[in-house]
Every structure is written in C-alpha cells, then in structure tokens.
Amino acid sequence: MSKGSAIIVLGLLSAFIPFTGFGALVKVLAVLFGFLIMGLGFLVRQERLWLLRSLSGEHKTDAYTENTAPQSGTSHQEA
C-alpha cells in the first residue's frame, strides 16, 4: 500500500470516528480532519502519477534555455 493510499484510508477511518461515541466537538474536528487527510492523500497521489508520467516521457514540460555560451577572450563588439 502506497503512502497516498494509506493517507486516504486513514482519512476515511477518521471520518467515521464521530460514530464511535465521542463528544460533539471531537466529532466535528474528526470529520474536518478526515476530509483534510483525504484531500492531502489525493494531492500526493496526483503528484506521484504526474511524476511517473514525466519519467516515462508521456508528460513533457516546456523549458527553454540559452544555447550560446559566452566565449572567453573574444569580444563581439567592434570599436
């Protein structure tokens, strides 16, 4: 089980904590934390899938760099 899947499962479990008999404030916080953990798990999983696609060549990013290196000792400007 990957980290992303573990976070999602823990989020689902913490969302069901309110039904175990704890107080009202703990129930609200447990549901809120559960949904936050599920959201974070989803983001981690999407990032992992993006990285795997990037490594396999399916996902290309546009990156432009200068190809010319400055030449030492020669000046391109004429006096």
Image (spheres, rainbow, N blue to C red):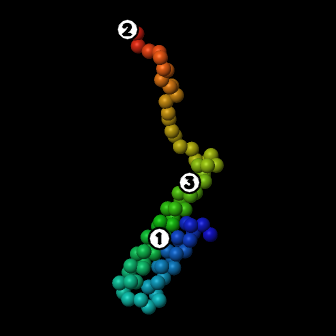
Amino acid on which the number 3 mark rests in the picture: Trp
Q: Which amino acid does label 2 sit on?
A: Ala
Q: Position of residue 17 (x, y in %)?
A: 46, 84
> Position of 23 compared to 39: left or right?
left
Residue at figure coordinates x 45%, y 75% from the top left? 34
Q: Is residue 43 left or right of residue 77?
A: right
Q: Where is residue 25 in the image (x, y as percent from the top left)?
A: 35, 84
- Residue in the foreground of this view, choosing between 69 and 16: 69
- Name the residue tied to disc 2: 79
The answer to whether 39 is drawn above or below residue 12 in the figure is above
Please, what secondary structure does the residue beneath circle 3 have? helix
In the image, residue 46 above or below residue 5: above
Q: Which of marks 2 and 3 is in front?
A: 2
Q: Do the residues labelled 1 and 3 touch (CB within 8 Å)?
A: no
Of the residues under marks 2 and 1, which one precedes in the sequence?
1
- Residue labelled with disc 1: 37
**Which residue lies at the image location 47% right of the left edge and 89% below the top edge?**
20
Q: Is residue 62 above or below residue 40?
A: above
Count neighbours of disc 2 (C-alpha within 10 A) and say few if under 14, some if 14 to 19, many if 20 or more: few
Dot 3 corresponds to which residue?
50
- Residue, x 58% and y 57% (percent of image)? 49
Q: What element carries label 2?
A: loop
Q: In the rendered structure, which amino acid carries the disc numbered 1?
A: Ile
Where the C terminus falls, by quadrant? Answer: top left
Mark 2 and mark 3: Cα distance apart in space? 53 Å
Residue 13, x across and y down, in percent:
51, 79
